[in-house]
Amino acid sequence: MAKIPENWKHRVSKKTDKKIFSKFKYSVILAKILAGRGITTEEEIDAFLNPSLKYLHDPKLLSNIDKGIDRIKNAVSNNENILIFGDYDADGIISSVIAYNFLKKLSLNVDIYIPDRFKDGYDINLSFIKKISKKKYYNVVICVDCGTNSKEVEQFIDSSRSDIDVIVCDHHKPSKIDSSRGKSCREEIKKYIIINPRLQNSNYPFKHLSGAGVTFKFITAVLRELDKGLKKRFKKDYLTKLLDIVAISTIADIMPLVDENRIIVKKGLKLLKETENKGLKKMLETVLSNKQEVDVYDVGFIIAPRLNAAGRIKSAKESLDLLKGDDGVNLEKLVNDLNSFNNKRKNLQKSILEEITDKNDFSHIASKQKIFIDKSKRWNEGVLGIAASNLANKYNIPVILFKEEEGKLKGSGRSIEKFNLYENLFSVRNFFEKFGGHEQACGITMVNSNFECFKEEMLKIAGKKLKKVDVEKKYYYDSKITFKDLKGSLIKEIKLLKPFGFGNPRPAFVTSDCEIMDVNYTRNEKHVRLRLKNKNTVFEAVMFNINENKKKILCLRENVDILYNIIENSWSGRKSDQLVILDIFQQI
């Protein structure tokens, strides 16, 4: 058997009962693909290949949801005033709109407050809650896509120093301090109600809903328990028709497309072209007018960046106004504004990346330091997260970038598979005024005078915990096959696995001993088109952003091993199957 590169990793597979797949009449290769995703039982296979709303979990399984339901029912009975406090990203904005529109149908007085990234920072804070408490106008604050780790606010509310009750619909991981608290502590909470599938005491079977997913679950549970008169205000398909924007939040927040998220996204994408959200409809008509069907790529790289751009460049008001779609609002202007913000965001991001890559030798950093940390007064705080993500993905190392202003640093970090960013930052938390996040992403606030010591400590941690192999680019594949396998039913079976995205990547395969029949570079020689032959079967292939080492392999015109996806390519009305090569290797 031919040896393959060490950085080509086979997905870890569970054992599968072949009898199950003979019952479903699927191929052994599809069985391997699903097993690599942990899907092996008859029920799991059916739910994955035939996602249906019947497989959505009961929202009543969420911890504290009964308390939240009761509080909203009391608010309806007493005609109380409610404030929705949401995050400034696409997930937070969508969560806010879902809650707002639902409560307005119950004739409640509802307002939305989206914090300013630059003035307020992330999450609800003590000064804000004290300020609105003094006004004695709002009876309930609903925090969406935030609030789980707002300890000061939680303590203030539960100490009865405010007449306000708080309901949190969130999906962020509780901090270590919080997760160490026992179940009884959560049960004692009466005024600060946290509904979050990731709470330590949660029995909810799926932990990875988006913030809007949790908000959707909450209003579903509330709607089911309203009296008949109030229920009549909602169409029978009211909840189902919300899945288009819940799907956007799921993709935008890079939630794994498995379990409930797979169902939400598959159904939501089908609904998008017929969306009843006026603002979203206007955006789709403007930026995706030529698309018959909207896919995960369209949401992740066209729709979501525009919804996020407002909060990155200015404030989230334009995105919020667009999705609320109130009468009299100029939707066309809002879409144009978001396009403008997104273009500005791309330019700022490009400028930061060019500055960083021009000044630094990342091959040296990856091999020696294994982490990149930097700061600048020039950088825009709103785009640091995506700039850090670009660098982390390109060089496969953790990256933390800071904006320096008035002696303070505000930063965003992104990480890689082998480096738990949250845990490692927690070990040096004494440097920070504030920090939060999860394994792969974080936000940090600290004084500038702590920067050098912090950087030194993180370099030590990365040097100790990351090996050379950890920062090498890795490619994961599902199965070793020949081109003959692709000519059977496999390509049709692969389509059953859609939608592809985080948590459910497009299947990747390895084929050895491929004969190079033809090589054609694009004008700038960045990309290459190939004709490859294996087992007397020929496929067209493409490889993007090809480097000099790969060009040398192709120059020799000798047989190669390839790791690739297979896609359906459309050109001039014709469709054909094409290989997209992720990596190429020549046996010595």
Image: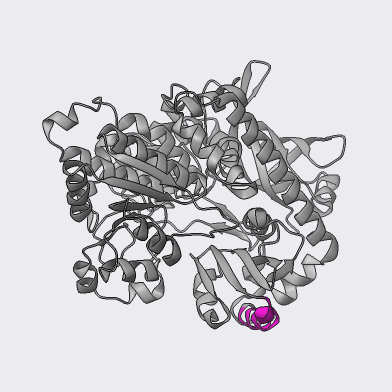
Q: Residue at x 72, y 69 (%)?
A: 374
Residue 193 percent across, percent down from the top left:
27, 59
What is the number of callouts on the image?
Answer: 0
Q: Residue at x 60, y 57 (%)?
A: 118
Q: Is residue 449 left or right of residue 140?
A: right
Q: Report the quarter where the C terminus lies.
A: bottom right
| Nearer to us in this view, 45 or 180 | 180
When the figure is inspected, residue 146 is found, relative to residue 325, above or below; the finding is: below
Residue 40 percent across, percent down from the top left:
33, 50
- Decide if residue 175 is in sight here: yes
Q: Residue furthest top?
A: 573
Q: Residue at x 38, y 36 (%)?
A: 26
| Residue 526 picture quarter | top right
Q: Is residue 557 left or right of residue 325?
A: right
User: Overall secondary structure of the magenta stretch?
Assistant: helix
Residue bounds of the magenta highlight:
448-461
Q: Is residue 83 left or right of residue 413?
A: left
| Nearer to us in this view, 502 or 27 | 502
When the figure is inspected, residue 238 is found, relative to residue 71, above or below; the finding is: above
| Nearer to us in this view, 371 or 546 | 371
